[in-house]
Amino acid sequence: MAILNILEFPDPRLRTIAKPVAVVDERIRQLVDDMFETMYAAPGIGLAATQVNVHERVIVIDLSEEHNEPLVFINPELEILTEELDEMQEGCLSVPGFYETVTRPERVRVKALNRDGEAFEMICEGLLAVCIQHECDHLNGKLFVDYLSNLKRDRIRKKLEKLHRAQANA
Ligand code: QAP
Ligand code: CO
């Protein structure tokens, strides 16, 4: 297992559209294991392969405090089930230190493959609905800051650019 480097906004590689996984094999299972280790170490509750610079459609999520409810979504497809919207404070391991309110559909169905390559589906509500939508956005090159005003997004970009410059010079 390995802890992978997490790309940070405004890294242009976060804008890559991920390709479907053709076969769920040992290579993908290794990626999934490394993504869990990386997410748990952060710590975070969700991570998309895009964030670790692997442009394949793989997501890991674990909302539990004990890190014992791992969820794997390979080639996820979302279907919105309601017109009801929910507001939630979101953050992102690729936008460290910033949290903003985002509005999203409150119920979605996700169809995906598990780590054995078997198809499953799940109806998601609450935090899980927010998280799966946030992570599916990553696979399409989209970030939660894209839902904010240009002013707010630019402020976040400038602060992170400044931080990255300081880190590069340290
Ligand atoms: C996405 O986000 C999410 O800024 C997962 O300094 C977030 O795991 C879905 C994190 C909120 C639904 C609601 C963020 C860790 C983790 C930070 C995360 C940070 C350290 C974010
Ligand atoms: Co994120």
Image (spheres, grey):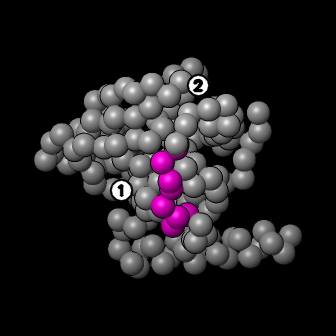
Q: Which residue is mark 2?
A: 67
Residue 61 visible to an observer of this rendering: no
Q: Residue at x 52, y 42 (%)?
A: 22
Could you give the CA–CA distance between mark 2 and mark 1, rounded to whole angstroms? 25 Å
The amino acid type found where label 1 is placed reads Thr
In x, y percent, where is residue 52? Answer: 64, 52
Q: Nearer the viewer, residue 65 or 72?
A: 72
Q: Residue at x 41, y 79 (%)?
A: 151
Q: Nearer the viewer, residue 76 or 100?
A: 76
Q: Reading the chain from its start, which is encountered first: label 2 or label 1?
A: 2
- 20 in the magenta segment: yes
Q: Nearer the viewer, residue 141 or 88?
A: 141
- Where residue 160 sits, quadrant-wise, is bottom right
Q: Residue at x 57, y 20 (%)?
A: 68
**Left or right relative to 101: residue 43:** right
The answer to whether 68 is drawn above or below residue 61 in the figure is above
Q: Which residue is mark 1?
A: 101
Foreground tag (2 vs 1): 2
Magenta stretch: dominant secondary structure:
loop
User: Which secondary structure lies at badge 2?
Assistant: loop
The answer to whether 10 is drawn above or below residue 139 in the figure is below
Residue 77 visible to an observer of this rendering: yes
In x, y percent, where is residue 128? Answer: 38, 35
- 4 in the magenta segment: no
The amino acid type found where label 2 is placed reads His
Question: Where are the magenta residues, as a range?
Answer: 14-21
